[in-house]
């Protein structure tokens, strides 16, 4: 058994993953839009969520077997079975870097190379 003080000399090894998302803009970026675009959202806004725990093939496809059938529920079948929002990790907006831009950056502010 591992106790609380064992981490002084023991470094546990676990799985670790990171996901980088590369975005392509379909919007006419210099032109203001009627509604705020995802990259203009306020800090703290959740753009999407990722399921916290891995799911298997059958949960992902909503199937009971590997054969396609009429009763397949798709991934939504699994999503509907989740009874707490704590199973999702939200991807939230952090606009704090925009505060360092001279003159501010609140609207029509988008990443540039």
Image: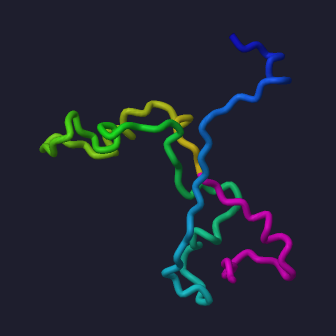
* Position of the C terminus by quadrant: bottom right
Q: Is residue 112 left or right of residue 98?
A: left
Residue 33, compared with residue 39, is above or below; it is below
Q: How is the image coloured?
A: rainbow
**Magenta-colored stretch includes residue 96:** yes
Q: How many callouts does the rendering have?
A: 0
Res 98 quadrant in image: bottom right
Which residue lies at the image location 54% right of the left edge and 87% below the top edge?
28
* Position of the N terminus by quadrant: top right
Q: Main secondary structure of the magenta part?
A: loop
Res 72 quadrant in image: top left
Q: Position of residue 35 (x, y in %)?
A: 55, 74
Q: Is residue 43 left or right of residue 59?
A: right
**Magenta-colored stretch includes residue 61:** no
Q: Is residue 105 left or right of residue 66?
A: right
Q: Report the residue that reaches farthest toward the front.
A: 9
Q: Is residue 26 left or right of residue 78?
A: right
Which residue lies at the image location 66% right of the left edge and 82% below the top edge?
108
Q: Position of residue 50 (x, y in %)?
A: 51, 47
Which residue lies at the image location 76% right of the left edge and 29% below the top edge?
11
Which residue lies at the image location 63% right of the left edge and 57% below the top edge?
45
Give the magenta part as a residue range.
Answer: 91-113
Q: Position of residue 78 (x, y in %)?
A: 35, 38
Q: Position of residue 22 (x, y in %)?
A: 56, 69
Q: Report the residue that reaches farthest toward the left.
A: 70
């Amino acid at each position: 058994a591992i106790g609380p003080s064992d981490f002084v000399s023991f470094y546990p090894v676990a799985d670790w993953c990171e996901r980088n998302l590369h975005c392509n803009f379909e919007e006419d970026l210099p032109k203001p839009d009627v509604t705020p675009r995802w990259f203009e959202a306020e800090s703290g806004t959740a753009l999407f969520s990722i399921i916290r725990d891995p799911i298997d093939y059958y949960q992902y496809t909503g199937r009971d077997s590997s054969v396609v059938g009429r009763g397949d529920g798709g991934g939504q079948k699994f999503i509907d079975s989740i009874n707490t929002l704590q199973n999702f990790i939200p991807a939230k907006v952090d606009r704090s870097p925009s505060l360092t831009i001279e003159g501010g950056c609140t609207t029509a502010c988008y990443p540039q190379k």
